[in-house]
Amino acid sequence: MASPSASPASELLLDEADVTSNKRNRSQENDEPLAESLTESEIAAATLAKKPRSSSSSFRHPDLPTSDHYHVSWMHASVVTSVASSTKHGYVVTGSADGVVKFWKRLNVETSKQRNDDNAANTSTGLDHAASHPCLEFVKSFTAHTDAVLALAMDMEGDACVSVGADDWLKFYDVSTFDVSTMIYLGNSNKSQGQQTRRLGSACCWIQDPVTFVKAVVVSSASTGDIFVCDAHQLLQTLTLHGTNPVTTLVNVPGRDCVVSTDSKGIIEVWSTASVAASSSLSSSSAMARDEGSGGENDDDDDNDTDHGATVLSIGGPCTASRNGVSYTSKMDTDLYELVRKKTYCIASAATRTHVALLCADLKIRLLEHSSGKLIVTFDERPKVYDQSYALHGIDAMEYGRRAALDREMMASMLEQSNTPLSTSAPPSSFQQVTIQFDPSGKHLLIPTVMGIKVLDWVRRKLVGWIGRADASQCRFIAICLAPGDAKMNQQILLARKASTKTSAGMEADAAANEDQHVKSDALVVALAHDKRRFYVFSHVDPVLDPDAPEDVLTRRDIWNEAPTVDDRRYHSDVHASADNSKTATKAILRTTMGDIHIQLFAQQVPKTIENFVGHSRSGYYDGVIFHRVIKGFMLQTGDPLGDGTGGESIWGGDFEDEFVPGLRHDRPFTVSMANSGPNTNGSQFFITTTPTPWLDNKHTVFGRVVQGMDICMQIENMKTDDLDKPLDEIRIQNVDLV
């Protein structure tokens, strides 16, 4: 019988990143240290020489939560496709494949002390653990589009948001009032064979003309290289910088008045958002843009059209050193043709004032310096890198194979969407887009991977942390949105909400008491997962590590704000205890030669596993059985009548199937779980963990927790063993008592 696989004692910082650094001349304004040029073997050797890190949680950043478990999740009725955040007003905006846009208000993330003070109040009002501090609060929902939401973009100040729909409508929102302000239609007026093809793509960002101070949105075309420039009232201009090659990404370089755009042939264009002529004399493309922009909601207002004609932009010109901070005059002096040379293209991009990161279809992340256009560093995220290193994350081959298959499915969907416009019959997950993002300091890059969301310190070329690593077995995170800083909460509203449970004077006293206490920020990371209609919120609070968390915290954190599907009901419905009392029990006591171990049994959640364990216990099957495998810092295994790990069968003869329940995880020490040799091969053997082992989730059925006798488990764990991890002095189960 196979045993659970152990996790490594330490984590390598950059073992899975093949880093190639290029020594480049850097601009004087960039004072970051230049890394040496290292080969992959040199980096591996340097990494091994580092002081080992016990876990990603050792990395601390006030605006960057790095919890292994998401704090709470909320739902849409369909697959969530896009997310944006306004730090100024404290809102998160999400969009889904059914065209719905939802506004969520950020809440204060409560500390353990604050929750302890409110425990009695939450119990009396019926609030569960997740609902009592959910990080977000639902505000408003719009059926904004008749088709999928392709993209959401927040403007630079966080005052306005735009949603791009597959129905070719742009909807503009006033974030402060969480309401629709205006909308325009950019679809084709001509129909071919009675069908109208989608015109808008999923690449979108905000810009501001530094000459006229006009804010506008730039949106890609679904099938051509056109880039549409629109304000909240009309189409202002159409750029044709990429010819017929569909634009795959658009990113505004903050503080530089320029945009970096990429297309399906790998061409990178850097163009200025400064208007070269703000007059009624327009280029031919701008004039055509105004003509074909008819159809917006304000088109019938001639006066309004005239007003906007005076502010039509003429952007898209070359960048200059004085205005845009570039030091090159020709693209031949840069690495902007790097993607063309490598025959790849960009599928996601992010930018700081000094650097641009490009995630490409060959699954390599290339970091370019904005001023020189030179390639600074390349990080390899191809599957073969993880194929060689998954064991370092405590994942066995079977679990990694399942993740890799899901990853291939997700990437195929992403690449299809970035290359060709999708039909209306496309699955909802096809409208999702992978994203990467810099943190506010610009020194850390967040990258969704098969192992979780990677936090990469690109300046030092080091992997410094993970987000959602424990939950990555259930969710393939693909898009991320960082909401830094504290939640913008009105204190009078907070007082009113808690008036029934705490007086104003009491809250003021609590605030004064907490002034001297270090409290982490309310920063959130909102993540979308492949083909999921939930979005996942990470905070500085890890619910599994919360000492006040209930036993079923992993299911309570999932908020049911939408009607469940058949699959949802199957995994979250209560299992009625209809079995005969002789086949079940709620508690077991292992009487061992070293002392008693008391185990709480989960009879309702995993009835068949408990029936098997109870049957063997009542029949005396476990009497005299030894602990045949003990690994310090991992687990204690027993239940094999042969005593060598190869024997044992179920009470029905042979094997029986797994029972995986979302709320029962290997998330804490002293978890009791079934040993097996693969899926649905449970017999009689079981083990007790002595540390959290999340890599065993959905591979081994959890059916109990040790509630008393932990010291006995530790004594067994510290016994001397041979080369096969078998204790030199036998420890036996004398008998099992059931309650």
Image (tube, rainbow, N blue to C red):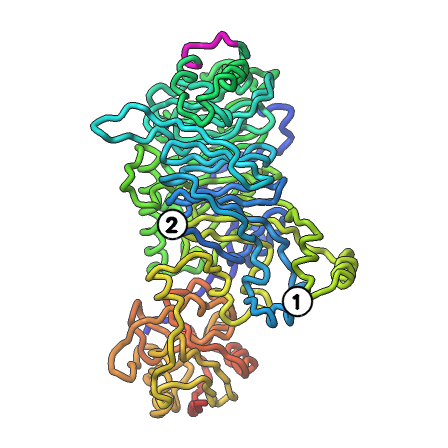
**SS label for mark 1:** helix
From where the camera sits, is residue 512 visible?
yes
Q: In the image, what residue type sits under mark 1? A: Asp
Give the camera-side residue of 170 and 657. 170
Return the residue nearer the eye: 129 or 724. Answer: 129
- Label 1 vs label 2: CA separation? 34 Å
Which residue is at 64% across, 54% downward? 108
Q: Is residue 226 left or right of residue 655?
A: right
Where residue 543 sits in the image (x, y, percent)?
A: 55, 62
Q: Which mark is residue 303?
A: none
276 w.r.t. 537: above or below? above
> Residue 494: within the magenta?
no
> What mark, if any, has residue 118 been given in the picture?
1
Q: Residue at x 58, y 51 (%)?
A: 65
Residue 20 at what x, y percent from top left?
Answer: 47, 35
Find the magenta span and give its range.
280-286
Q: Give residue 263's position: percent from left, percent from top.
A: 38, 27
Q: Is residue 731 above or below residue 408?
A: below
Rendered-image quadrant of the N terminus = bottom left
Label 2 belongs to which residue?
78
Q: Secondary structure at mark 2?
A: loop
Residue for point 53% across, 32% down: 351
CB atoms of marks 1 and 2 within 8 Å: no
Q: Quadrant of residue 709?
A: bottom right
Question: Would you call the spot at circle 2 few (<14 residues within 10 Å), some (14-19), or many (20 or more)?
Answer: many
